[in-house]
Image: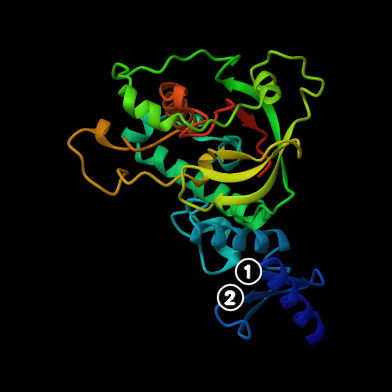
Amino acid sequence: MASLVAEAMVQCQETEATYAIITDEVRSLVLRSNVDLETDIDAEIFVAEKVSIRQIITHFVYRETREKGLCVLDYVSSDPVWSGVTASRNPRPLPRLLLRRSFEDFDVYTMQRDKLAWDDFMIWWKIYDEEAGISGMAPWNLQPGTRLPASQLRIFGEGGHQVWIPQGRPFIPIPFETKALVVRRYRPREDHLHHLYAGRVHDPNSQGHSFEISSAISAGRAQYSQTFLGRFDGEGPLMCLKLFDERFFPLPERAWGHQYRHSRERLTDFNLALDMIRREEAVYKRLEYLQGYLIPHCYGFHKARPSL
């Protein structure tokens, strides 16, 4: 029995599991690994006549998800025998919630006015943030040689499927003397990539492009963008890739923890990836005449397959 317990605890440590169950379908031994003190083990024994294995699993799943805020339960009994009788449950519809893949799937207007809608968003965000960390494929874990597949080229920019004209203050050209200083050194645009991204040449591999990472410039949690150096399809010139992954955006500061006179004042700093892309395009569009001089060439805005 000691060897079974030892093996169960080793598996708990390797898989970061909180509980282990050893059973002969007559009695069940439930072990809890204390993550703070790895040598400390809590154990409980349950008899199948009083509580089934299914009840035991359900009880500890409820207890764990309630502690981590992944499932809303008003109360969980300390005894699995009574969990299904006395627990007052109002669980979130997690399967439907997990079908959402981006911030665009949540309605900001509703979240400004309904605390439960905001709580649903926070549950979704916490699940996907933890999932990325566990998978090892979060942006800050991407190693040189990793290829990010592109699912759609040219969602914005020249030849893009969506036409959008930046609006704002009128364009005021810089003085002639200043422009003469900043345009002395020019780095030419890569014509092949430019025409490929703009849809001006035949693309023999339109469904199989990727970006091969060479190094990370800036990647981490609570950032609006993740920036890398690499090469398109693993060849050609070194380029800069800026990823806007909403799962790692900073959480809004103007959320439900503060009081506002009007609900419309809440979540005004809730940004979508689409918002960030449009701002980026607006800047490059207004400074188009400086591309290749003071700022890099912009080769458009594309969509990566959500495989992180």
Coloring basis for residues: rainbow
Q: Name the quadrant containing residue 168.
A: top left
- Frontmost of labels 2 and 1 is 2
Check disc 2 and give the amino acid type: Val
The answer to whether mark 2 and mark 1 are in CB contact below 8 A is yes
Q: Is residue 142 above or below residue 239?
A: below
Instruction: Give SS at disc 1.
Output: loop
Left or right: 239 in relation to 11: left
Q: Would residue 119 be visible to someone looking at this image?
A: yes
Sequence-first disc among 2 and 1 = 1
Q: Which mark is residue 232?
A: none
Which residue, as the protein is rendered here, is positioned at the far left?
Answer: 261
Q: Quadrant of the C terminus?
A: top right
Q: Residue at x 58, y 77 (%)?
A: 34
Q: Name the quadrant containing residue 287.
A: top left
In the rendered image, residue 73, in percent from the top left (x then y), is placed at 48, 53
Who is closer to the viewer here, 75 or 260?
Answer: 260
Left or right: 235 in relation to 194: right
In the rendered image, residue 102, in percent from the top left (x then y), is placed at 54, 35
In the rendered image, residue 130, in percent from the top left (x then y), is placed at 57, 54
Q: Residue at x 30, y 23 (%)?
A: 175
Q: Residue at x 60, y 65 (%)?
A: 81
Identify the residue under disc 2: 35
Identify the residue under disc 1: 18
Q: Quadrant of the N terminus?
A: bottom right
Who is closer to the viewer here, 207 or 192?
Answer: 192
Q: Is residue 228 above or below residue 83?
A: above
Check disc 1 and give the amino acid type: Thr
Q: CA distance from mark 2 to mark 1?
A: 8 Å
Who is closer to the viewer here, 253 or 143?
Answer: 143
Q: Name the quadrant containing residue 143.
A: bottom right
**Label 2 crowding class (10 Å Cα cut-off): few <14, some 14-19, many 20+?**
some
